[in-house]
Image (tube, rainbow, N blue to C red):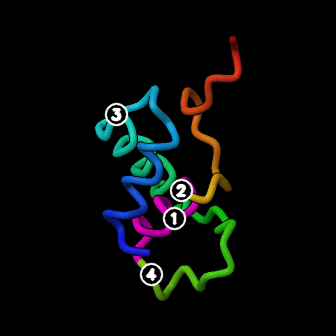
Amino acid sequence: MKIEELTAKVLDENQNIDRYQLAIAVAARCDELENGATSKLNINPKSIKSADLALMEIAEGLVVVKGFKDNEK
């Protein structure tokens, strides 16, 4: 899936965030990945940019970003 499609998927599924908050979340996960965190996808982290990998993990729901899910109703 293209990066634009992944971004649109995340924003469509999470109406309580905007693209700027998503960018901050991707950057935070990217830092974790670059500092040794294990990827939650079965993709070789050496074969893909860490920012793309972070966005893919968020889009698949494998990484929950605080504030994305509105569990309190």
Does label 1 or label 4 sit earlier along the sequence? 4
Q: Nearer the viewer, mark 3 or mark 4?
A: 3
Dot 3 crowding, Cα within 10 Å, few <14, some 14–19, many 20+: few
Q: Which residue is mark 3?
A: 18
Task: Tell me the residue that label 4 is attached to.
Answer: 48
Distance between the alpha carbons at the discs numbered 3 and 4: 25 Å
Q: Which residue is mark 1?
A: 56
Q: Which residue shows up at 46% across the image and 59% down it?
A: 55
In the displayed structure, 41 sits above or below 47; it is above
Could you tell me residue 47's position as x and y percent? 48, 88
Local packing at callout 1 (Cα closer than 10 Å; few below 14, some 14-19, many 20+) is many
Three-letter code, disc 4: Ile
Residue bounds of the magenta highlight = 49-58
Does the magenta portion include 57?
yes
Q: Residues within 10 Å of mark 2 (few under 14, many from 20)?
A: some
Q: Could you tell me which residue is drawn at 55 percent across and 27 percent down? A: 67
Label 2: which residue? 59
